Image: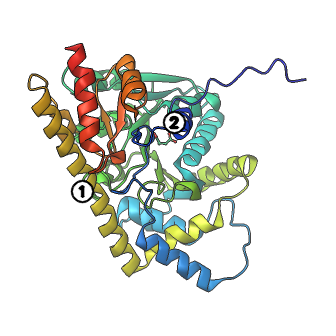
C-alpha cells in the first residue's frame, strides 16, 4: 500500500538535533537549533511563566475548546504588544489577530489564505531565509522566490539590490521579511532602511508578511517591533506572524499569533472569517494553556515587568557570548575580521563556515552548527564558549 511513499530527507535543523542527542561525547555543544539555553546549558523556565502557570493551576476550571480564532484576551494582548498599548489600530477594527499554533501555525494559516485568495501571487523570501519558510509556502501551493539580502562580502545587507528586486515585483506579490533578528544571518535592516523599504512596497501594491519570532532578542521588545510599527503608521495592509516560543521560553506550548492589518474594518472582518475557515480545516482551534500563559504574562503588570527583565537578561547574555567569541577568535586569527559577531542581532550568527568546515567542527570537536554555517549563539555559555572558539579557530586556521 505505501511502497510508493518516498522517504523524508529530514529537516536540516530538527534532524541535526536528533544526531546531537545521540552523540555520546560529554563535551558536545548544540549550536544548531534556535533555542535559548542558559549558563547551565538548560532551557530556562522563566519566573514570569512559572507564576502564570501557578495562577492558572490555582484558578482551576474546565478545559473547553477555545473559539477557532483563539482566546479574546490573548488576541488583544498580542495586538498591544505588536503595535504598542493605546495604538489607534487596536480600536479601529482594521487589525485582526488569531491565536495560532506557534508562529509556524500563523505562517501556515497565512499561506493557506494567500493560496486561496491571492492565487496569482508568489511569495518572495530573503536570500537566505529560514528553510521552513519555503517549505511552508510551497506546501500550501504558493510559489516561492528569493530577493537579494545577505552580502557575504561585507557581512551586511545588499540593500540597494534588495530594493531594486522588490520594486520590480508585480503588484500583490507577497514579501516575507524578518522583523528583527534575521534567521539565519543575524543581519537586520536598520530603521532608516525600513523607512525606505516600506513606502516602496506600499507604492508597488505589495503585501508585506513579517515574521517576528525573536522579539526582545535584538535591541528590546519595542525596538524590535520597529518595522511593525512603521508599517502600521504607513497605512499599508500587512501580515505579521509572531511567536512566544523563544521570548517566553515556551517552545512546546505552541504560543503564537497571526495578525492582519487591513484597509478597513469591513475587509478585516472578511479576512478574519476566511482565516477561521482555514483554521477549522487544519486544527480546529488553538491550545487553551498557551492562551492562558501568554495572557497572564502580557496583561498582568507585575508578571509583565518580570518577563521583560528576564528577557533583557537573556539578550545581555547572548551579547556577552558574542563578545567572548569575538575576543578569542580575534586573538587566535588576527588576520580575520570577526566583527560580524558584534554587529549581528539576536540568537543567530552567519559564520561564513563552509559545509565541510561545519562537518569538521561536528566530527572532530563535537560542536554542532547547521550546514549553512548558521550558529545559534544562545547555545554558548561560560563553560563552552572558549572551547568552541578554539575549535572554530582550528578549522578556519587550517583553511587559511
Ligand atoms: C530555528 O530556526 O532553529 C528555530 O526556528 C526552530 C525551528 O523550528 O526551525
Indicate which disc, 2 or 1, sits on the residue closer to the N terminus: 2
Q: Quadrant of residue 349?
A: top left
In the depicted view, which residue is nearer to us: 290 or 144? 290
Determine if the C-beta at disc 1 is less than 8 A from ligand 1.
no
Q: Residue 380 in the image: x percent, y percent?
A: 32, 46
Image-based side of 142 in relation to 5, left or right:
left
Tell me the SS state at disc 1.
helix
Q: Quadrant of residue 312?
A: bottom left
Q: Residue 55 in the image: x percent, y percent?
A: 54, 82
Identity of the residue drawn at 72% across and 51% down: 283
Q: Residue 242 in the image: x percent, y percent?
A: 46, 52
Tell me the SS state at disc 2.
loop
Whether residue 265 is visible to the viewer of this picture, yes or no, is: no
Q: Residue 203 in the image: x percent, y percent?
A: 34, 34
Whether residue 299 is visible to the viewer of this picture, yes or no, is: yes
Residue under label 2? 23
Residue under label 1? 316
Residue 341's place in the image compared with 159, above or below, is: below
Residue 212's place in the image compared with 358, above or below, is: below
Residue 13's place in the image compared with 282, above or below, is: above
- Which quadrant holds the C terminus? top left
Q: Separation of disc 2 and disc 1 at Cα?
A: 30 Å
Identity of the residue drawn at 84% across and 19% down: 3
Image-based side of 330 in relation to 389, left or right:
left
- Which quadrant holds the N terminus? top right
Amino acid at each position: 500500500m505505501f511502497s510508493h511513499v518516498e522517504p523524508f530527507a529530514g529537516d536540516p535543523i530538527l534532524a541535526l538535533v536528533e544526531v546531537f542527542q545521540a552523540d555520546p561525547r560529554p563535551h558536545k555543544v548544540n549550536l544548531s537549533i534556535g533555542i535559548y539555553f542558559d549558563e547551565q546549558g538548560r532551557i530556562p523556565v522563566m519566573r514570569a511563566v512559572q507564576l502564570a502557570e501557578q495562577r492558572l493551576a490555582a484558578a482551576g476550571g474546565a478545559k473547553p475548546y477555545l473559539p477557532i480564532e483563539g482566546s479574546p484576551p490573548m488576541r488583544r494582548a498580542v495586538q498591544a504588544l505588536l503595535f504598542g498599548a493605546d495604538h489607534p489600530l487596536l480600536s479601529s477594527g482594521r487589525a485582526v489577530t488569531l491565536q495560532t499554533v506557534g508562529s509556524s501555525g500563523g505562517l501556515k494559516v497565512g499561506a493557506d489564505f494567500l493560496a486561496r485568495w491571492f492565487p496569482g501571487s508568489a511569495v518572495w523570501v530573503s536570500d537566505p531565509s529560514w528553510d521552513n519558510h519555503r517549505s511552508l509556502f510551497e506546501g500550501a501551493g504558493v510559489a516561492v522566490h528569493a530577493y537579494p539580502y545577505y552580502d557575504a562580502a561585507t557581512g551586511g545587507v545588499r540593500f540597494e539590490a534588495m530594493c531594486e528586486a522588490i520594486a520590480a515585483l508585480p503588484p500583490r506579490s507577497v514579501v516575507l521579511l524578518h522583523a528583527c533578528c534575521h534567521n539565519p544571518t543575524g543581519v537586520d535592516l536598520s530603521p532608516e532602511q525600513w523607512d525606505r523599504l516600506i513606502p516602496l512596497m506600499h507604492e508597488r501594491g505589495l503585501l508585506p508578511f513579517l515574521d517576528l519570532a525573536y522579539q526582545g532578542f535584538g535591541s528590546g521588545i519595542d525596538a524590535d517591533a520597529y518595522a511593525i510599527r512603521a508599517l502600521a503608521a504607513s497605512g499599508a495592509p500587512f501580515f505579521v506572524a509572531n511567536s512566544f516560543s523563544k521570548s517566553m521560553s515556551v517552545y512546546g506550548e505552541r504560543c503564537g499569533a497571526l495578525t492582519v492589518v487591513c484597509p478597513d474594518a469591513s475587509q478585516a472582518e472578511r479576512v478574519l472569517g476566511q482565516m477561521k475557515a482555514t483554521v477549522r480545516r487544519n486544527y480546529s482551534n488553538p491550545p487553551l494553556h498557551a492562551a492562558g500563559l501568554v495572557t497572564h504574562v502580557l496583561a498582568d503588570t507585575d508578571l509583565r515587568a518580570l518577563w521583560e527583565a528576564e528577557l533583557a537578561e537573556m539578550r545581555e547574555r547572548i551579547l556577552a557570548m558574542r563578545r567572548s567569541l569575538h575576543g578569542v577568535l580575534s586573538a587566535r586569527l588576527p588576520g580575520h575580521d570577526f566583527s560580524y559577531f558584534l554587529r549581528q542581532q539576536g540568537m543567530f550568527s552567519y559564520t561564513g563556515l563552509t559545509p565541510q568546515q561545519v562537518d569538521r567542527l561536528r566530527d572532530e570537536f563535537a560542536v554542532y552548527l547547521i550546514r549553512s554555517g548558521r550558529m545559534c549563539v544562545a547555545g554558548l555559555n561560560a563553560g563552552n564558549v572558549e572551547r568552541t572558539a578554539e575549535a572554530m579557530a582550528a578549522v578556519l586556521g587550517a583553511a587559511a
